[in-house]
Image (cartoon, rainbow, N blue to C red):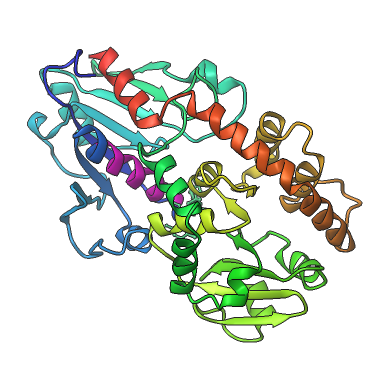
């Protein structure tokens, strides 16, 4: 980048929170990395500071402008407003096609040096992604071109978000039992829960959680299932026989269920590193699981007409060849398995998956090494932006 530009670029991200935490989770991770590792002056416009605060407790939910870990965070209230060209940064990122304010687009067109305008798209393992990554799209009226930027799993995509020190930090944590025991104690786990087979559970409400709990109760070894507050609340509450608040826990048979507080993003990573198996969902936690060095099961974000099943299969085709039990379990977990399978199959699905975990762990590590070769998304994005200037 530095060879293309005389100075470090400035950059703005527009983020609309559609629901949950992934939209802001991804934008915040990207913003932080660009600032911390590349020295980019980043402004993050976001329309839902309350959601932001759950993954980053320093955020003040009422503030119109605040600096959080070196990133200027601005509350985005709506589409109105006039902007001047000098308010426009060198690079403008529109996250997941959220429409940025028309007044801002006019200001972009009036800026003497046109900004690089990128539409940051969702992560998918489908083949068409390679063909669409970096495609231009001309503005119908103004002299402006937007380019599509896709994260992905191959060298012909933008790669995955990954911080520079992530591998080193994870290795230090995982090779130090005292550190990860202290971390888990800090989350409220007892010593026996720390010694059990630990599963973190992050999924959408329609996952067949109750059936899985039934299977786990009858497991041959103790299982500690750690669920962030608010996740699978109905099934968790039914198991606990009490409100699913952080700190609540109960044991039936081999299963101890514990509700965890929702933690800041870096601690969520540590949780993934500390568990033996992670259930993740959406996009950002799914990617973090791929960098955690632990087997994982993905609950994909629902899309109309079961489009998400196609995306799930595309990922399993890339990631899980030969991991038959992981494939069967994942399809069933996402409601994409054979229709005949019903609740009593869960003990078998679980014991098959459990037996396959050593192989799944090897696959996770090999996959990670492959993904590493694609570079990290923030660096790839800056390189692409530099090539357009
Ligand atoms: C459980 C937990 C998660 N997190 C973070 C990790 C991630 O950054 C974020 C969760 O984001 P995700 O895993 O993507 O799942 P998600 O379901 O929360 O988010 C999204 O999924 C996308 C595919 C959709 O586009 C979005 O609209 C959104 O629904 O929350 C914490 O920081 N602390 C926690 O305790």
The x and y percentages for residue 250 are 65, 82
On the rendered structure, is 62 left or right of 364?
A: left
Q: Relative to 63, does residue 172 appear above or below in the rendering?
A: above
Q: Tell me what residue is drawn at x 28 percent, y 38 percent.
A: 13
On the rendered structure, is 170 left or right of 64?
A: right
Does the segment drawn in magenta span residue 111? no
User: Farthest residue toward the bottom?
Assistant: 242
Q: Tell me what residue is drawn at x 53 percent, y 55 percent.
A: 272
On the rendered structure, is 269 left or right of 39?
A: right
- Comparing 200 with 130, the one in front is 200
Q: Relative to 212, does residue 123 appear above or below in the rendering?
A: above
Quadrant in the picture for residue 141: top left
User: Farthest residue toward the right?
Assistant: 340
Quarter of the picture containing the N terminus is top left
Q: Is residue 19 visible?
A: no
The x and y percentages for residue 119 are 37, 29
Q: Tell me what residue is drawn at x 53 percent, y 29 percent.
A: 371
Q: Which residues are magenta?
A: 22-34
């Amino acid at each position: 980048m530095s060879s293309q530009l005389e100075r470090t670029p400035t950059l703005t991200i527009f983020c609309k929170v559609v629901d949950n935490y992934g939209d802001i989770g991804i934008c915040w991770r990207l913003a932080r990395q660009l600032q911390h590792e590349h020295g980019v002056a980043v402004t993050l416009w976001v329309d839902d500071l309350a959601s932001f605060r759950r993954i980053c407790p320093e955020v003040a939910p009422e503030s119109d402008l605040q600096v959080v870990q070196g990133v200027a965070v601005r509350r985005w209230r709506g589409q109105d407003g006039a902007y001047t060209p000098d308010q426009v940064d060198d690079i403008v990122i529109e996250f997941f096609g959220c429409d940025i304010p028309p007044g801002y687009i006019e200001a972009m067109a009036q800026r003497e040096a046109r900004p690089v305008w990128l539409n940051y798209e969702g992560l998918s393992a489908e083949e068409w992604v390679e063909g669409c990554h970096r495609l231009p799209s001309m503005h119908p009226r103004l002299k402006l071109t937007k380019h599509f930027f896709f994260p992905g799993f191959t060298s012909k995509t933008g790669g995955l978000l990954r911080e520079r020190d992530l591998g080193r930090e994870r290795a230090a944590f995982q090779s130090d039992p005292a550190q990860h025991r202290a971390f888990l104690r800090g989350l409220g786990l007892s010593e026996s829960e720390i010694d059990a087979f630990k599963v973190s559970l992050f999924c959408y409400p329609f996952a067949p959680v109750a059936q899985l709990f039934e299977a786990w109760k009858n497991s041959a070894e103790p299982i500690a299932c750690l669920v962030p507050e608010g996740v699978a609340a109905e099934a968790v509450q039914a198991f606990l026989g009490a409100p699913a608040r952080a700190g609540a826990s109960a044991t039936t048979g081999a299963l101890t269920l514990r509700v965890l507080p929702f933690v800041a993003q870096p601690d969520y990573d540590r949780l993934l590193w500390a568990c033996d198996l992670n259930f993740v969902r959406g996009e950002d936690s799914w990617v973090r699981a791929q960098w955690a060095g632990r087997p994982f099961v993905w609950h994909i974000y629902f899309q109309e007409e079961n489009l998400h099943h196609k995306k799930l299969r595309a990922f399993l085709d890339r990631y899980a060849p030969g991991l038959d039990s992981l494939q069967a379990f994942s399809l069933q977990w996402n409601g994409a398995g054979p229709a005949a399978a019903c609740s009593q199959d869960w003990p078998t699905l679980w014991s098959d998956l459990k037996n396959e975990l050593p192989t799944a762990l090897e696959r996770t590590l090999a996959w990670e090494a492959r993904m590493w070769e694609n570079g990290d998304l923030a660096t790839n994005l800056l390189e692409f932006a530099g090539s357009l200037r």
